Amino acid sequence: MKIAVLPGDGIGPEVTREAVAVLECLALPGLTLFEGDVGGAAYHRHGHPLPAETLDMARAADAVLFGAVGDPTCDTLERHLRPEQAILGLRKELGLFANLRPARVFAGLEHLSPLRADIAASLDMLIVRELTGDVYFGAKGQRVNADGEREGWDAMSYADHEVRRIAHVAFRAAAASGWKLTSVDKANVLETSQLWRDVVVEVAAEYPGVTLDHMYVDNAAMQVVSHPDRFGVVLTGNLFGDILSDLASAAVGSIGLLPSASLGERQTAHGTFGLYEPIHGSAPDIAGQGKANPMATILSAAMMLRHSFGREAEAARIEAAVSAALADGVLGGDLGGSHGTAAIGEAVRARL
C-alpha cells in the first residue's frame, strides 16, 4: 500500500501530519508512505510547483494524500509557476477526471449551518463532478464583434466518452450506497447538456437497481438549500459541479470538515488510483499556529482507504472516530471551539 504524501503549503503540512498519524494508528500491513514537495514549497526548493521527482513519486504510488497549495509570496510569478498549477498538473498528468465530494452535516452541528437546523440535519449527499472537460478546458478568447465592442467567448463541450466514464463512476457510487442518482444539467437550453442527459440515460440501462432522475442546475441549486433530503448522489459537469459543491459545503457550516477524492481509470492491485485532499486552501494567515482543523484531511484519508485500497471497515472506523470526537465537543476554531490541530488529531486517534 504505497501512498505519496504531498503536504504542500500553509496549513497543509500540519493537517496532513495528523491524517498520516491516524493511518499509522491503524497499523495496516504493508503501508508505505513517501513524502514529496509540491506547490509553493516545491517552487522555493526546486524552482517549480510540481517537480519531476514529485510527479514520478505520485505515478509510482497507489494513492496520493494531498494537503493544500497556495503561497502569497508566489503571487507575482508567471502563472505556470504559481503553486495552484501543481494540483492542476497532477489532475492532468494522472488522468484524474472524477471528483467525489461528500457533504453532510454531523449530528449536533446543525446550528453551524446557515440553513435552518431541521433542514441542515437532512443534508447528506455525494457530488460527483467531472474534472477535465467542459467550458473550463474548451477554447476561449477575446475578440471584437461587429459593433466594434470587445467580446469574450468560451466554448463549452463534452464528448460522449467523457460523459460516459464519469456517469459510470456516479452510478457505481449510487449502487454501492443504495442512494438514488440525480443528474444535473441545463438540457433545456444547452446542446452540451442534451448530450450529457442522453448519455447518462444510456448508461443508466446498465444499472437497473439505481433510481435516476434529472434536474436543471438552477433548480438543483434551490433544492440543495431548501430540500437537501431530495439528493443522494449528484452527477454533474465541471462548471455546474464547481458551483454546487461549494454551495453544499457552505451549507454544512465549515470547510474544515469536508474531504474530497479525485479518481481516474487507472486500477492498482487494491482499487482505483486517486488523489485525496481536504477542500480548504492553505490558509497562510494561520499557518504554523496549530489552529487548523485536520478533520477534513483525516476524512480524506478515510476516502482513500475506501476507494483506493478497498478498506471499507477501516474507512468507516475513521469516520466514526471523527463523528465521536465532534459529538464529544472536540471542535476547532472553525467550529467555534478552542481545540488545536494536534489536540483534534489526538482525539480522533483516541476514539479509534
Image: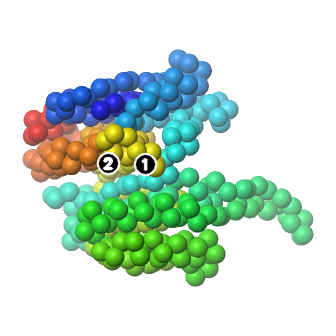
- The mark found on residue 263 in the picture is 1
Q: Please state if 146 lies on the left or on the right of 203 as rendered.
A: right
Specify which label sits upstream in the sequence, 1 or 2.
Answer: 1
Q: Which residue is mark 2?
A: 307
- Name the residue located 48 percent from the left edge and 75 percent from the top edge: 202
Evaluate if marks 1 and 2 touch, with contact meaning CB atoms under 8 Å apart.
Answer: yes
Q: Nearer the viewer, residue 148 or 59?
A: 59
Q: Nearer the viewer, residue 8 or 172?
A: 172
Residue 84's place in the image compared with 103, above or below, is above
- Give the crowd class for mark 2: few <14, some 14-19, many >=20 residues within 10 Å: many
Q: Quadrant of residue 148?
A: bottom right
- The mark found on residue 193 in the picture is none
Tell me the kind of residue under disc 2.
Answer: His
Q: Nearer the viewer, residue 116 or 313?
A: 313
Please indicate, yes or no, whether residue 223 appears anywhere in the rendered image.
no
Residue 178's place in the image compared with 188, above or below, is above
- Name the residue located 36 percent from the left edge and 72 percent from the top edge: 207
Tell me how far mark 1 sits from mark 2, CA to CA: 9 Å
* SS for dot 1: strand
- Name the residue located 40 percent from the left edge and 32 percent from the top edge: 61
Q: Quadrant of the N terminus?
A: top left
Question: Seen from this angle, which residue lies furthest top?
Answer: 45
Residue 236's place in the image compared with 98, above or below, is below
Residue 32 position within the rendered picture, expressed as x and y whole percent measured from the top left: 29, 26
Q: Please state if 265 lies on the left or on the right of 315 as rendered.
A: right
